[in-house]
Amino acid sequence: MNLAGRVALVTGASQGIGRACALKLAQCGASVALVARNQQKLDEGAQEIAQAGGNARAFAADVENEDQVKAAFKAVISEFGKIDILVNNAGITRDQLIMRMKRADWDAVLNTNLTSAYLCTQQAISSMLKQRWGRIINITSVFGQTGQAGQANYAASKAGLIGLTMAVAREIGSRNITCNAVAPGFIETAMTSTLSNEIRQSALKMIPLNRIGTPEEVANCVAFLASEEAGYITGHVLNVNGGMLMG
């Protein structure tokens, strides 16, 4: 999976799956723009890539904010000249039973997980159209496919990403731009590290591979979908869940 000469932008790149994606894309030869809110963590990620011989820059932005998104993409294109690969990974949780869920928690999750992908995709497409080549990869979730009690906002946002993926794939496929989604299951990240041992053991019972996945395993799939080798795949949801959901 040779991505030499390509420019990738990854949102939510300061930690977890986003950071792993940025590192993997850089290993494959892409220049990487890391976007998230935490400047310090972004700088650390960019430095890690640079120390490994890669090329990366950090761009602090809140992807909920349309003006900040526009400014970040403008800065990335000014720095690198183009955007070939967009990984919409930024995501948060605000868990609560639906009858108790506050509107603010619903809005925050939908805005960060779903609306940000719309905003970022809109900003990236013009560059991709000019070069008639592009890869858009949305990080959704197994819970966007199955639902999850206490996560109506999260599940709705991730299901929405799947619909967005398919709609965009149909819109831009004729321009040699693909749009796919990766749906992780239980992955060892900061988001899952707070789960109780009881919940973790319960989750393992649902996973035929009998283990929690790693961010690197998700990143490997993202790198594949970003490559030339995946050029005839679009509108697809690639499940990375250890067999938790099949079919």
Image (tube, rainbow, N blue to C red):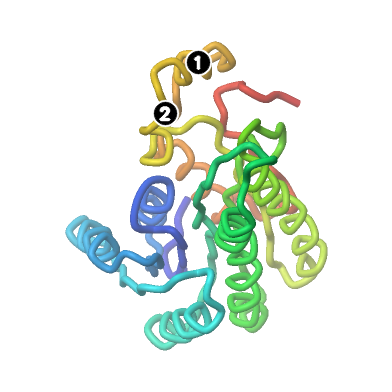
| Three-letter amino acid code at the position of disc 1 | Leu
Task: Look at the image and tell me in which quarter the C terminus lies.
Answer: top right
- Marks 2 and 1, how far apart at CA: 13 Å
Circle 2: is it few (<14), some (14-19), or many (20+) Cα within 10 Å?
Answer: few
Mark 1 secondary-structure assignment: helix
User: To which residue does mark 2 refer?
Assistant: 195
| Three-letter amino acid code at the position of disc 2 | Leu
Circle 1: is it few (<14), some (14-19), or many (20+) Cα within 10 Å?
Answer: some
**Is residue 186 depicted above or below 229 in this figure?**
above
User: To which residue does mark 1 refer?
Assistant: 204
Q: Position of residue 35 (x, y in %)?
A: 40, 67
Q: Which mark is residue 83?
A: none
**In the image, is 91 to the left or to the right of 15?**
right
Whichever of callouts 2 and 1 sits on the residue coming sooner in the sequence is 2
Q: Of 79 and 228, which appears nearest the observer? A: 79
**In the image, is 39 to the left or to the right of 168?**
left
Q: Quadrant of residue 41?
A: bottom left
> At 47% from the left edge and 80% from the top edge, which residue is drawn?
68
Note whether residue 32 is visible.
Answer: no
Q: Position of residue 145 (x, y in %)?
A: 71, 36
Mark 2 secondary-structure assignment: loop
Q: Residue furthest left?
A: 51
Labels 2, 1: front one: 2
Q: Quadrant of residue 148?
A: top right
Q: Of 100 and 92, which appears nearest the observer? A: 100
Q: Position of residue 89 (x, y in %)?
A: 51, 55
> At 43% from the left edge and 58% from the top edge, which residue is drawn?
12
Q: Quadrant of residue 188?
A: top left
> At 54% from the left edge and 47% from the top edge, which residue is drawn?
224
